[in-house]
Amino acid sequence: MSQRIRFAPIGLALIAALLVASCVQPGILGPAPPVTNSIVEIRVTHLEPTSPLVHSIDDRQKIDAVINSYAMASQGWSESGRRELPPTYRIDFVDQSGRRATYWLGANSDLGIFPCYAICSGWWIAPSDAAGTIDSTRYKGLTSAISLYLFKDLGL
């Protein structure tokens, strides 16, 4: 009997790992993050249906923190399967010449399959395509640990 009890935590851990692994999608390479020293401002637009709310970040430390965060890294992106992810925020990285690199931030990125919808939730970030709309081919799911710091640095 004691042997069963001793191995039970390992079996539960294995089952939990398999459930979480079933939610993970294969990673693809994402866009290169904006070049840190060329960005002079980050504009965050809350996409309210009635009137968008915009605030600007020009603090060098916060700009660097956002650009250097895991959210902006070119690793860890997933194929979206062209499913529609409605954004809550638009994030524009503005360089010295006024050019923008636009990203989109929203909630509920996890797959609607068992067990993902039962045990997962989260925010996502997606780049823009050449037309300036959401790139429907890829996104990055953000864990709470990543999104908390990102939100703090973005003033959300």
Image: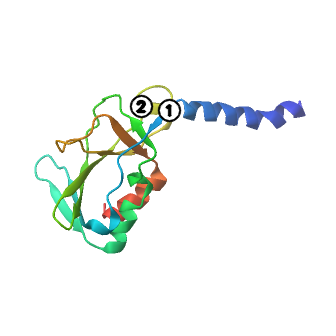
Residue 138, relative to residue 71: is it above or below? above
Residue appearing at x 62%, y 35% in the figure: 17
Contact (Cβ within 8 Å) of mark 2 with mark 1: yes
Residue appearing at x 31%, y 60% in the figure: 156
As shown in the figure, which amino acid type bears the numbered disc 2? Leu
Q: CA distance from mark 2 to mark 1?
A: 7 Å
The residue identified by callout 2 is: 111
**Residue toward you, 94 or 156:** 94
Residue 50, relative to residue 85: is it above or below? below
Relative placement, left or right, of 3 versus 105 is: right
The residue identified by callout 1 is: 23
Residue 137 horizontal/vertical position (percent) = 32, 34
**Residue toward you, 80 or 95:** 95
Residue 107 horizontal/vertical position (percent) = 34, 43
Q: Looking at the image, can residue 136 be seen?
A: yes
Give the quadrant of residue 154: bottom left
Residue 78 horizontal/vertical position (percent) = 41, 37
